[in-house]
Image: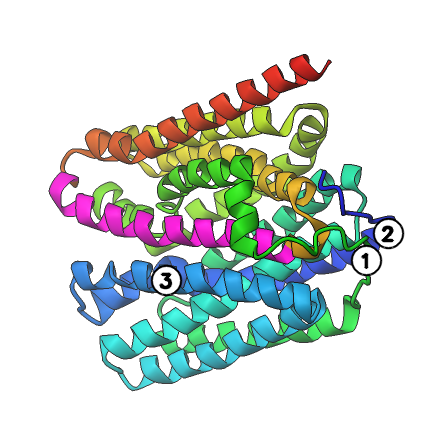
Amino acid sequence: MAEDTVNTSSHPERVVHLAAAWFVNSLAYSIVYPFLPLYLNLERGFALSHVGLIYPVMGVASIVGPMVAGGLADRIGRRKVLIWGPLGRAAIFFCLSAFAAFDAPFSWFMIALFFSAGMGTFFQVASDSYITDITLEHERPRAYGKIRIGTNIGWMVGPMLGAFLARTPFSLLFGLTGVLCLSASFFVRATCPEEKVSHPVAARTERSFFSVLCAHRIFAVMMVVSLLLFLMTSQLYSTLSIYAKNNIGLTSNQLGMMYAANGLTVIVLQLPVNRMIERLRLSLCLVIGATVYTLGYASLGWASSFGLAVLSVILISSGEVLTLPTFSTWISRVAPAHMLGRYMGAFSTVRGVGYSIGPYIGALLYPQLSGEPVQFWLLLASFGLVATGGFLCLHLRGAREKRDDA
């Protein structure tokens, strides 16, 4: 754990409140996100190559947004960022609702989605930092796990609700998303007071955040390896929706149920897996999680029916419950307290890079390999395979250093 982190506060009730806010926040976005490429491609008639551009555009925002959010979370407090992030996003979704109602050009959607993605990172970064402020170190795997449960209940309900409303104008889905974002903002304001964490100002000689990152080699290596993993995991709500519709032949209702299986798996497995995370080294949890993730994506090459697709998604979700809480817990231990928001922001930036480049890679490969599903998904899963090797090297290095210290 970082030397200047001193936290003796524990507020489990606020963890539950934040998990509830994550439920509302993820419910809002998941209503539209899985169906967005279908709307732009099938309903509006925009070319798939154009639709694929929304991911790098949103990715740029996901790269810039966390660094801004992290700095703000450290300077003005986590609570303000938690409130203003969903509030700004709500305004953007109301604009998108108007764009859909009046058949706005594709460029307008790209601009709005850019700002939506950027504002979305504010809640993520501030939430991860706030959890560290209100929990003790040994409580964090379970706390981050509860956040994942709240998030995935939203991701389970959202696609089903979106599929049910698929026959209504898409402007209604954008408008409903805006209302839910407003609700998340108001709920946080009412239930999550600012936590003042005291810590010694031990690092005033540090020149800048980037100089710290350059000196923090293990953190930098972890971010590079994580990027490779995110290039693969980013296919779930982008490439897979198109593949499942066109290649497997899933209906909108089946697509919604497939994504609901993702959320349900996390809900069922997260708390039991948290106990395993607490017992094992975090680096080993990442090795196991990345391996399961990779097997899940590779198995999509043989998923020729709704049932097999659901089984692949369950396997993918099992990797998710191992890796995502582990990432947040690991960062909370290595980050200096006065720069925690910026470290969380750096991680979200890396994830943003992966979630922007990854779907675009999928969109470029899909037209070339749509008739070769095994080759297509094995190629995308190769990113996860390399990431697994990277996590394994970090784990072995840590185990070797621990033996040397002993």
Cα–Cα gap, marks 1 and 3:
32 Å
Image disc number at residue 197: 1
Q: Disc 1 marks which amino acid?
A: Val
In the rendered structure, the answer to whether residue 291 lies left or right of residue 126 reads: left
- Mark whose residue sits in front, 1 or 3: 1
Front residue of 3/173: it is: 3
Q: What residue sits 29% from the left and 86% below the top?
A: 102
Labels 2 and 1 touching (C-beta < 8 A): yes
Provide residue 101's location: percent of width, then percent of height: 33, 84
Residue range of the region highlighted in magenta in the rendering: 341-369
Which residue corresponds to mark 2? 9
Image disc number at residue 60: 3
Provide residue 241's location: percent of width, then percent of height: 32, 50
Secondary element at tag 2: loop
Pointer 2 local density, CA inside 10 Å: few below 14, some 14–19, many at least 20: some
Cα–Cα gap, marks 2 and 1:
8 Å
Above-or-below relation of 363 to 70: above
Quarter of the image that includes the C terminus: top right
Task: Check if residue 365 falls in the magenta segment.
Answer: yes
Q: Earlier in the sequence, mark 3 or mark 2?
A: 2
Q: Disc 3 marks which amino acid?
A: Val
Q: Disc 2 marks which amino acid?
A: Ser
The answer to which image quadrant residue 109 occupies is: bottom left
Q: Earlier in the sequence, mark 2 or mark 1?
A: 2
